[in-house]
Image (tube, coloured by chain):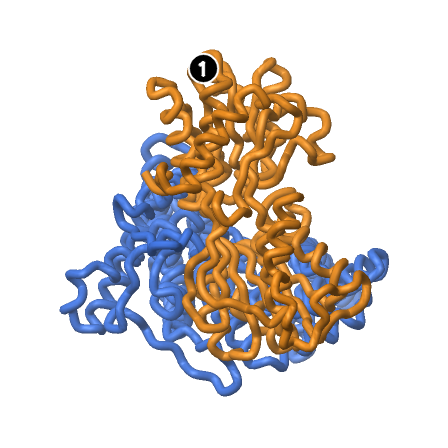
Amino acid sequence: MALGLTLAACGSKNDSTTGGTSGTPSAGKPASNLKIGLAYDIGGRGDQSFNDSAARGLDKAKSEFGFDIKELEAAAGETDAQKEDRLRQLAEGGYNTVIAVGFAYATALEKTAKDYPDVKFAIIDSADPKVDNVANLTFAEQEGSFLVGVAAALKSKTGNVGFIGGVNVPLIQKFEVGFAAGVKAVKADATVQVKYLTQPPDFTGFNDPAKGETAAKGMYDAGADIVYAAAGGSGNGVFKTAKANGKFGIGVDSDQYNLPALADVKDVIITSMIKEVDVAVYDFISSVKDAKFAKGEKVYDLKAGGIDYSTSGGKIDDIKTKVDEYKAKIVSGEIKVPSTK
Amino acid sequence: MRNLTLRSVLLGLAAPVGALVFAALLCAGILAVTGHSPVDTVDAMSASAQRPRTLVNSLNTAVSYYLSAVAVAIGFRMKLFNIGVDGQYRMAALLAAALAGAAFMEGVPPVLRVTMTVLASMLVGAAWAGIAALLKVTRGVSEVISTIMLNAIATYLVSYLNNPARLAEVNPGSNDVKTPDITAGGQVPGFEVTGSSSKVYGLVFLAVLVGFLYWFVLSRTRFGFELKATGLSESAAVASGVSVKKMVVISMLLSGAVAGLVGIPELLGASHSYSLNFPAGVGFIGIAVALLGRNHPIGMAVAALLWGFLFNTANSLDTAGVPREIVDIMQGVIVLSVVVAYELVRRYRVRAEQHAVGHALGRTKTAEEVSA
């Protein structure tokens, strides 16, 4: 939250605005003529994961600025044509600020953005397409994962930890690679068990707590005492298993210790790798509002913010100094965290 | 006689039309109960029907649905349930994409290159379905079970192969994995339509050709007759000298070969590579389309177009504030009610025939009595 405020503050640091809007918007008053369209990936609002995170950013912008918003959602079995149609319908409908949630929109956005030069687009999680009116909002998930890997290695009594990925795609592999690197940086001989719940195009691994339970049980039985769940909604199952077995888990995307939906199992969540898609969405909307739209890639990492680890619950207070040392080294560039195997 | 024809035509139309009307009414009811306006829904759908882009997309979607439905229908006519179309086409699309995008294909003339790609996809689809056929004829494994399991295996295999270490590549900064792009010489250009940013698949004719061959082979060749005969009664087919095992293998191979084509119009016409975003699940939609179209080449085409249109109206519904899930509900209700309606019409027809026969016999008897 503090980070979000910092970033928001950064965004409106210079109050000379050309968009005809006041630099300090008052809540509830329509601030400008922005109309915001959001195209979700499969699952949409309510997926307890990636899409919901984007939705939070949108909600925050709406409640502060009072923009007109429209949310559309992807379906399974789509080709690029349906995604393109979705983006075009938003642009045609007068939505002049359009956010595509997920790399699946890259091809569709490339074709659409060129035809609507006056519309400002953003895409989450993809450095493609490179078009003048597109902002690419990407995250260095490997850096945050490295830090929770460090925490896991320091906290593990068995020297055996686990990684559960929702779906075996390059995006989630970044979490795995960073986590493993973090663990090994602390304890070179530690064991890292790795398991992906599903293979593409089966994306149910992001929202199937039962699969998370089974996978986590296998890891705890095989000697792991901490499991990092980079699996969206399936993480609930991992934490449930952790609680039942007296073990621990690590959350992902938001500070999962504080999520109401996970209140029953929060005691086992020692930390979370925070990826603030909501901050990215909110920042982007603010930037358009303040007429400070910047095209191209904007990387959210430990240095720029948007990626971090959480300490809620106090389970890693004793090692926080050590984790922060690593964090400082990554920020300074002394440690380069790999993102691919 | 003319009466009878008109009547049978009406009876034939009664089931699908009745099912559609029933589904529309039920969906209107669901919308009303959940606080959405059925009128808005119809508005959004008719707005879709007037937008060239949506119509082009609907046609393209229908092309892949139709190929999938024909693949399923070939099995259905033999009483074989090929649930593996999904795995078959995904395997075929991936390997065909890898072949068509490979560097050594650069020098191959376009026509030959496209033909090779299409044939490769058919071979892969047939081979994947062939595993289920072999298991059935040698070990007696139900093709329902084996094709479902082969779908899961295909998912893992595709995921294994669609990897930068093997057939695919990752662009720096992208989170997608895809096979190398098929260059212009390996693509099939689409048809421009005024007012639409999407093009009609160049391979739309492939679907027409497959539909024609399906009709021709089944109704105009000895093989087609034997296939249908085996499907209707295995023992009768055996008695007339048909080798059932051979028929199982051949029809599964054919079904798989057509299944292999499902992803090809999209691959060569639009996406030009197999990526994480390549459409999945079309094989299962084919089952519904084949059921709805009663395995008939024209019926399935109508069903595929309807399904394609419904699928492509979802964005407009979303925009109009109508939950897009209504499309899924509508499709589900249509399939269920069509199956029920066909059964009702069949029973009605049987009863009507019995009645007519009974009536005719009764009258003959009376006539005899009179003459006696």
- The number of numbered badges drawn on the structure is 1
- Most extreme residue toward the bottom, as rendered? B194
Question: Which chain does the residue under circle 1 lie in?
Answer: A
Residue A277 drawn at (x, y percent)? 58, 50
User: Considering the image in quadrants, where does the N terminus of chain A appear?
Assistant: top right
Please give left or right for residue B263 compared with residue B370 in the image.
left
Report which quarter residue B332 is drawn in. Answer: bottom right
Can the viewer see residue A92? yes
The residue lying at 71 percent from left, 55 percent from top is A60
The residue lying at 41 percent from left, 36 percent from top is A329
Q: Nearer the viewer, residue A309 or B329?
A: A309
Palette colour of chain B: blue
Above or below, comparing residue B32 to residue A208 in the picture: below
Residue A257 drawn at (x, y percent)? 66, 31
Residue A119 drawn at (x, y percent)? 57, 75
Q: Nearer the viewer, residue A235 or B305?
A: A235
Above or below, comparing residue A258 to residue B179 in the picture: above
Residue marked by disc 1: A222
User: Considering the image in quadrants, where does the C terminus of chain A appear?
Assistant: top left
Amino acid carrying mark 1 in the image: Ala
Report which quarter residue A339 is drawn in. Answer: top left
- Which secondary structure lies at badge 1? loop
Q: Nearer the viewer, residue A285 or B19?
A: A285
Residue B205 drawn at (x, y percent)? 38, 74
The residue lying at 21 percent from left, 59 percent from top is B102
> Badge 1, how many Cα within 10 Å: few under 14, some, many 20+?
few
Palette colour of chain A: orange
Can the viewer see residue B356? no
